[in-house]
Image (tube, coloured by chain):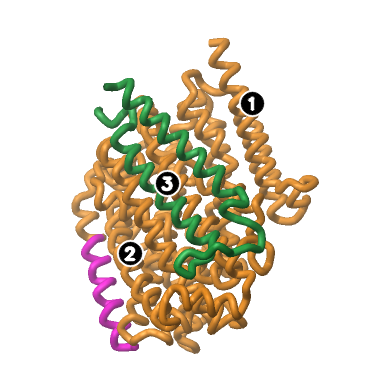
Amino acid sequence: MQNKKTLYWRLCCGAMVVLSVLTFTPLVIPAGRYEPMLAGVPLTLWAGIAIAVAMVALTLVGTYVHPDSGE
Amino acid sequence: MTLWLWIIGGLYLAALVYATIHSKQRTQSADDYVLAGSNVGLFLGFLTFSATVFSTFTLMGMPDFFRTHGVGAWIFLAVSDGGMVFLILALGLYLRRRVAEKGFKGMSGLLAECYGQRWGGYVYFAGAFLFLVPYIAIQIRGIGIFLEGAFPGMLPFWGWATLIVVVMLIYSEIGGLKAIIFSDAMQGLLLMTVTWIVALGCVRYFGGVGAMFEQVGQVNEALLSTPGPNGLFSVQFLVASFFAILMYPFTQPQVAVRIVIMKDGASTRRMAVAVGVFAVMLIMATIPIGMYGAVRYADLSVSDFLVNVLMFDQAPIIGAAVAVGLIAAAMSTADSQIFALGAEVRSLISGTERAVMLRTKLAIVFFAVAALVFAVLSNDQLVLLARVSFAGTAMLGPLVLAGILSKTPPGVEVIVVTALGVVVFGISSLGVIPASVGAVRMDLLLFAVLGVFTLGSVLYRNRRA
């Protein structure tokens, strides 16, 4: 059980690193470009909102799989 | 609006007086006074953390940031805060373990213990003092310029600022951290409520979110993408800001103490999630306020824009609630910071409890006066000043993390290099030396150098031990 928790926790950390790196690539912050828009919201903003929400969701998941969560 | 201001302001003041007296009655010892008994639950814990982190600079600075620099402001703060709450989850445990092992009076004292030498604590305290005072000052300045604009002719800016500092000092000195936590909780709820009411009003003005960005694009297309009209949100700026904000819960003492005083590990972890939700919701509400400003008040000064959007364009009861919310926000963040600096002094001095408490209280008054003077002398770029503060204290990040995480006491070289980093960043912020080396920003370069050097030193010493 503890091994599985450690694995899931590491996956959370890995996903966090991927999201963080992704944020600073042209996929999220292309210089001077705001399309494609989503529901009228410019690219950087909707992608940024998705990333921030995903980070908080990962934090929530992390509270359950954190190696210390059973203590 | 004046009637509503008296009613809402009176209610807030009455609640503050009650919280102060209640806290004073329940304070039994110096630890109760400075650390609120270290038994704070999830609800109060997340509200005091959020109110300490999100303050005047969020409700006033972020709308202005969106108005002036565009949607990249979301990446600057919200994404960085998403990373920050995950780091609280990941590293909060280690901080709490160190506290359980070494005891806690303040981060400076804890680091002096972890490093086995007082200089670890002194360097932390010096860095925190240097870069927190400007941050405290912007809270006071922010609310001062807002109130001066909102009530022309009543009091000059410095008069408002002094009044705020005096009220803040009274309840902090009497009620200690418990009074501050209650004031934070009230402010957090008030801040979130009024910000969303104003935000929804701004969206309604445009007729929807899509229409809002369409009109913003017509006014200034550059606001819809990075780096923004003034080129501020470069990749380097955003990356450096990300690291600065990531380190924030461990490098700024008023925030670190809120991780330490949580009653257990489970509450701390849940608090991190709650703060993340609070951050996303609050910063999201500042987007339409900023976009409204970009369309309607693009050419106004910061204070004129804020007074119009937050007060004069609102129903009287909302305008009054915003004014009280802003005063509460400024006070709750500034008092936490000033109080935390006082607690840091306490953690570095020794003597009888009575003598130590007296010096701590005097130190709190000294820091408040220093912040007031800085507030009067600084400029109106609230968010940029806040960012200098984040980045400056982030220079202490490797020092703090090494102290918390290293199995053996980190070496004196980490303390020396951190002190040099703080000095170099300080003089670069003042413009004495360039703000970049070649194409690389100075703060980013210093983060990298301090991080790599500290990691190398810790790995080397742990291997030799």
Range of the magenta residues? B1-19
**Residue ID for mark 3:** A55
Image quadrant assignment for residue B376? bottom right
- On whether residue B447 falls in the magenta region, the answer is no
Residue flagged by tag 2: what amino acid is it? Answer: Gln
Q: Colour of chain A?
A: green
Q: Residue at x 37, y 82 (%)?
A: B319
How packed mark 1 is, by other alpha carbons closer than 10 Å (few <14, some 14-19, many 20 or more), is few
Tell which subunit mark 3 falls on: A
Q: Residue at x 22, y 60 (%)?
A: B21
In the image, which is nearer the foreground, mark 2 or mark 3? 3
Residue flagged by tag 3: what amino acid is it? Answer: Met
In the image, which is nearer the foreground, mark 3 or mark 1? 3
Mark pair 2, 1: CA separation: 42 Å
Q: Residue at x 31, y 38 (%)?
A: A63
Secondary structure of residue under mark 2 = helix
The quarter of the picture where the N terminus of chain B appears is bottom left
How packed mark 3 is, by other alpha carbons closer than 10 Å (few <14, some 14-19, many 20 or more), is many
Q: Residue at x 47, y 34 (%)?
A: A14
Q: Position of residue B177 (x, y in %)?
A: 32, 51
Mark pair 3, 1: CA separation: 35 Å
Q: Position of residue B40 (x, y in %)?
A: 25, 45
Labels 3 and 1 in the same subunit = no
Secondary structure of residue under mark 1 = helix
Extreme residue toward the top, this view? B464
**Residue ID for mark 2:** B187
- In this view, the residue in front, B327 or B157, is B327
The letter of the orange chain is: B
Identify whether B5 is placed above or below B221: below
> Is most of the magenta stretch helix, strand or loop?
helix
Residue flagged by tag 1: what amino acid is it? Answer: Glu
Q: Are marks 2 and 3 in contact (CB under 8 Å)?
A: no
